[in-house]
Amino acid sequence: MLQLFIPLNFLGFVYRELKKSLADTARMFRLLDARPAIHDAPDARPLAATRPRVAFEHVAFGYDGARRILDDVNLTIEPGRKLAVVGASGAGKSTLARLLFRFYDVDAGRITVDGIDIRELTLDSLRDAIGVVPQDTVLFNDTIEYNIAYGDPEADADAVARAASLAHLDDLIGRLPDGLATQVGERGLKLSGGEKQRIAIARAMLKNPAILVFDEATASLDSHAEGAITGALAELAADHTTLVIAHRLSTVVDADEILVLDEGRVIERGTHAGLLAADGAYAAMWRLQQRRGAVTTAS
Ligand code: ATP
């Protein structure tokens, strides 16, 4: 039975991957059709700032002509500060991060880094300056150490271990017989979503980017995993200009500013305490979470 199961399982995997890649390709071509390619302006210059200010000024954007996803969005993240964006699923939160990374250009308004329109910066220098901790971290079939050091082949073992420690991975690594040398991924140890995200946080720590974008996983986590992620993020964000796309209010309580996005518009902004006192949409979201004992911001 097992002999039959393994090849069938493998075929299933191949089928799923093929389907996914065809869907991705189809979507990519639709996007390529719909929008001009992103490339360097002829006189583009490299970004120099190490602790930059990020600003969105009257930004409007839609993936296609049919629907506006962001409408007149204004925000500023001061150097070294943390701005969190919350709102229901589909409100446009992750789109902000995609625009900052210049996967797409805005339709109106502008995004600046230290006052320079990002369309005037070289793409390489912009993207090098941004560390992204994505919702779903894809790990390579290799060791934990490789996965943390990925992108920085020069990183020495001590630096990797330090990053792992700051990302609250010590517990996990301590339980593994081969520690940092343990194989992970399809052919190795399967890690939980929270553990994978902490590996991405360690990777970002090693990269030490000027700007950090943390796209929080939507999957619910147990309170231990959530505490570990929140702690790891706090370490990482402490010294970086940080944009957090949040699904759990526990992640945003300590943010310098919180934006509430609704159908692409900013409907509220302030600190956690200020927004609770204002008793609007954020306060309602907060009360809902308290009642449910749940932690998601999407209603
Ligand atoms: P979630 O909390 O579920 O992650 P979000 O607030 O981050 O949601 P976005 O991912 O920014 O939402 O998406 C905003 C809207 O844009 C959604 O309606 C989504 O369907 C649409 N959208 C996202 N990506 C694309 C794309 N590549 N092409 C067309 N529409 C898209």
Image (tube, helix red, strand yellow):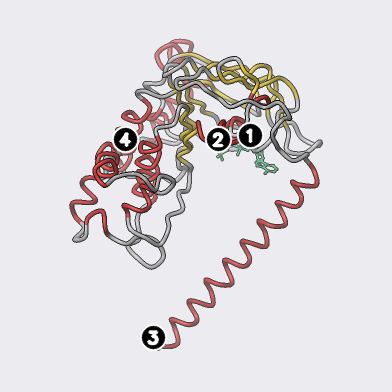
Density class for disc 3 (Cα within 10 Å; few <14, some 14-19, many ≥20) is: few
Circle nearer the viewer, 4 or 3: 4
Quarter the N terminus occupies: bottom left
Circle nearer the viewer, 1 or 2: 2
Marks 4 and 3, how far apart at CA: 41 Å
The structure residue drawn at horizontal position 25% and vertical position 39%, both measured from the top left corner, is 162
* Residue 89 shown left or right of residue 255 in the figure: right
Sooner in the amino-acid sequence: mark 1 or mark 2 = 1
User: Which residue has dot 2 on it?
Assistant: 127
In the image, residue 243 sits, relative to residue 24, either above or below, namely: above
- Circle 1/circle 2 CB separation < 8 Å: yes
* Residue 141 shown left or right of residue 181 in the figure: right
User: Which residue has dot 3 on it?
Assistant: 2
Specify the amino acid type for callout 4: Ala
Sooner in the amino-acid sequence: mark 4 or mark 3 = 3
Circle nearer the viewer, 1 or 3: 1
Density class for disc 2 (Cα within 10 Å; few <14, some 14-19, many ≥20) is: some
User: Which residue has dot 1 on it?
Assistant: 102
Circle nearer the viewer, 1 or 4: 1
